[in-house]
Image: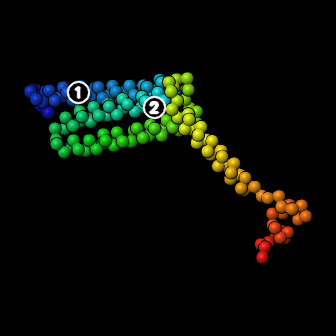
Amino acid sequence: MTPNATGADAVIDAVTAVLLIVGALMSLGAAIGLLRFPDLMSRMHAATKPQVLGLFLVLAAMGLQMREWWVWPVLAVAWIFQLLTVPVSAHMVGRAGYRTKHLHPELLSTDELEAVVLRAAGQRAAEKAQEAGSAMPHAGNARNGGSEDPNGVNGGPSA
């Protein structure tokens, strides 16, 4: 760029500067939220929402400043990849944090996962009890010393 650019170049440079500053502030806000928010759920919100918008603004600024058509699809792919992966990773972190009790329940307005987790825990406990019941060795009869071998032969396979 020439130092005395006028007209469209000056407008594009000004818009690029604004987009870069706002995008950087959004990303800075996400970083500060990660450090300052009290619990996992609010930190997770701070890590995802402003970070994705900040990245979009920075990518848009890059696209404007490059002034080439071929860069826009590349930047769009990078942003779409962020849009697809950030919510999924936040969801997984949130579920893991919920299950390991790394949250403040008094800060939740509604707990929509409580019923699902209790139901899954009950089913898991019933399955373990059923497995433990079927894996218990039978008492056998007292004559062969409680061996589970029905033929009364200890050691070795039965014929």
Q: Position of residue 66 (x, y in %)?
A: 19, 38
Answer above or below: position of 144 versus 25: below
Question: Could you tell whether 36 is left or right of 57 in the image?
Answer: right
- Residue ID for mark 2: 44
Q: Position of residue 72 (x, y in %)?
A: 21, 41
- Comparing marks 2 and 1, which lies closer to the viewer? 2
Q: Position of residue 96 (x, y in %)?
A: 53, 38
Q: Quadrant of residue 34?
A: top left
Which secondary structure, mark 1?
A: helix
Question: Could you tell whether 90 is left or right of 132 in the image?
Answer: left
Question: Could you tell whether 120 is left or right of 11 in the image?
Answer: right
* Residue 3 in view of the camera: no
Q: Residue at x 72, y 52 (%)?
A: 133
Q: Residue at x 21, y 29 (%)?
A: 16
Q: Nearer the viewer, residue 39 or 152?
A: 152
Which secondary structure, mark 2?
A: helix
* Residue 148 in view of the camera: yes
Q: Residues under labels 2 and 1: Cα distance?
A: 29 Å
**Which is nearer the N-term, disc 2 or disc 1?**
1
Q: Residue at x 23, y 27 (%)?
A: 17
Q: Amino acid at mark 2?
A: Met
- How many marks do you count on the picture? 2
- Residue ID for mark 1: 17
